[in-house]
Image (spheres, rainbow, N blue to C red):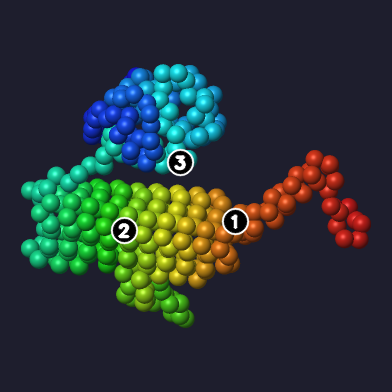
């Protein structure tokens, strides 16, 4: 068993630094009167040392704060007074966002190692920016366009005509077809983009496949998790908006339109022609039937079965889904019945 180590194992993650506390404060958009101190890395509260920066965002871990040995800690104003002597408090109202920024400073995302691996197969008509990286065994089809600083991982297949923007990260064993990607898009290993939608006509003699003639459009900064699948549209496009984050093992059907900054969590499934507004959250294993409209900022709970439209800002749970207030009211009623030992009898007063 390996020893417990701080984040950022050098075998797997690049590192910069050390950085001064003043540099960290500037990155967070705050001011500090603390004396100059060099910080070498990031670490959790319980393992951080004098050269590390840590953070506290979840109140459940507040008891760890007074005992931390961190050189600096990113905290909400509510906890600033509990930062121990000798530790510099970097106070911000968004500690977790600050932690993300500081972690990326010490461990930046990999940059393209410009060039095409000798084992990659690239069609002569493909347009690949000289600053991009094409990994071992990758296949790049005809008329493909790949922007500056983009990384295409090993054994990935980019089909004919695909356009990929700048500074994208296409990880290993991804397949992309019938798609146009913006800048800074991330496709994690095994993602499948642009395959046929699940479309067929049912007649007396069986199933007749319906040609899927649309595309997949993925906006700037979107991330698609490992082994997730996004079908191309049938007669229109499947659209993944800017900043959308899709977890691993998610299925997106044809013609789905997802608004910007929406989050869809593992094993959720979105059926065809559903429109999801901006800033929606779809929790794990939720299922949405087709041709629905989900309003801006709606929240769909884990394992919900959504069969009707959801208004903006609504929170739903259960299967079939209903408002969270109605859902918990039913749960509470059933719990009270079970605890009281009362069992509803059949109509007419007979035995149950």
Distance of mark 3 from mark 1, alpha carbons? 24 Å
- Is residue 340 rendered to the left or right of residue 47? right
The extreme front residue here reads 33
What is the number of the mark on residue 198?
none
Residue positioned 17% across, 64% down in the render? 144
Mark 2 Cα-neighbour bin, 10 Å: few <14, some 14–19, many ≥20: many
Mark 1 Cα-neighbour bin, 10 Å: few <14, some 14–19, many ≥20: some
Residue positioned 12% across, 62% down in the render? 127
**Dot 3 corresponds to which residue?**
94
What is the number of the mark on residue 315?
1
Q: Quadrant of residue 228?
A: bottom left
Q: Secondary structure at mark 2?
A: loop
Residue 141 in view: yes
**Dot 2 corresponds to which residue?**
220
Mark 2 or 3, closer to the camera: 3
Answer with mark 3 or mark 1, whichever residue precedes in sequence.
3
Image quarter hosting the N terminus: top left
């Amino acid at each position: 068993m390996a020893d417990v180590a701080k984040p950022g194992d050098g075998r797997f993650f690049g590192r910069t630094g050390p950085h001064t506390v003043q540099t960290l404060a500037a990155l967070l958009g705050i001011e500090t009167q603390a004396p100059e101190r060099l910080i070498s890395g990031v670490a959790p509260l319980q393992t951080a040392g004098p050269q590390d920066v840590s953070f506290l965002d979840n109140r459940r871990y507040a008891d760890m704060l007074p005992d931390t040995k961190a050189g600096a800690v990113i905290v909400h104003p509510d906890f600033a007074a509990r930062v121990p002597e000798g530790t510099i408090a970097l106070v911000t109202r968004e500690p977790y966002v600050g932690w993300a920024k500081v972690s990326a400073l010490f461990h930046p995302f990999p940059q393209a190692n410009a060039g095409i691996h000798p084992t990659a197969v690239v069609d002569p008509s493909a347009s690949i920016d000289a600053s991009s990286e094409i990994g071992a065994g990758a296949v790049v089809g005809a008329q493909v366009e790949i922007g500056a600083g983009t990384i295409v991982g090993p054994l990935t297949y980019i089909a004919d005509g695909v356009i990929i923007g700048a500074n994208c990260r296409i990880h290993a064993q991804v397949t992309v077809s019938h798609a146009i990607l913006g800048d800074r898009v991330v496709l994690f290993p095994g993602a499948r983009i642009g395959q046929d939608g699940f479309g067929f006509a049912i007649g007396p003699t069986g199933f007749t496949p319906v040609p899927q003639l649309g595309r997949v459009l993925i906006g700037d900064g979107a991330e698609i998790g490992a082994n997730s699948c996004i079908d191309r549209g049938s007669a229109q496009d499947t659209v993944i908006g800017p900043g959308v984050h899709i977890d691993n093992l998610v299925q997106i059907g044809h013609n789905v339109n997802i608004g910007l900054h929406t989050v869809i969590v593992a094993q959720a499934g979105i059926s065809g022609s559903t429109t999801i507004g901006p800033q929606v959250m779809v929790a794990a294993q939720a299922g949405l039937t087709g041709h629905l409209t989900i309003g801006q900022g709606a929240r769909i709970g884990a394992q919900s079965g959504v069969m009707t439209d959801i208004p903006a800002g609504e929170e739903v749970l259960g299967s079939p889904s209903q408002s969270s207030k109605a859902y918990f009211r039913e749960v509470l009623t059933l719990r009270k019945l079970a605890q009281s030992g009362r069992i509803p009898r059949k109509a007419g007063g007979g035995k149950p």
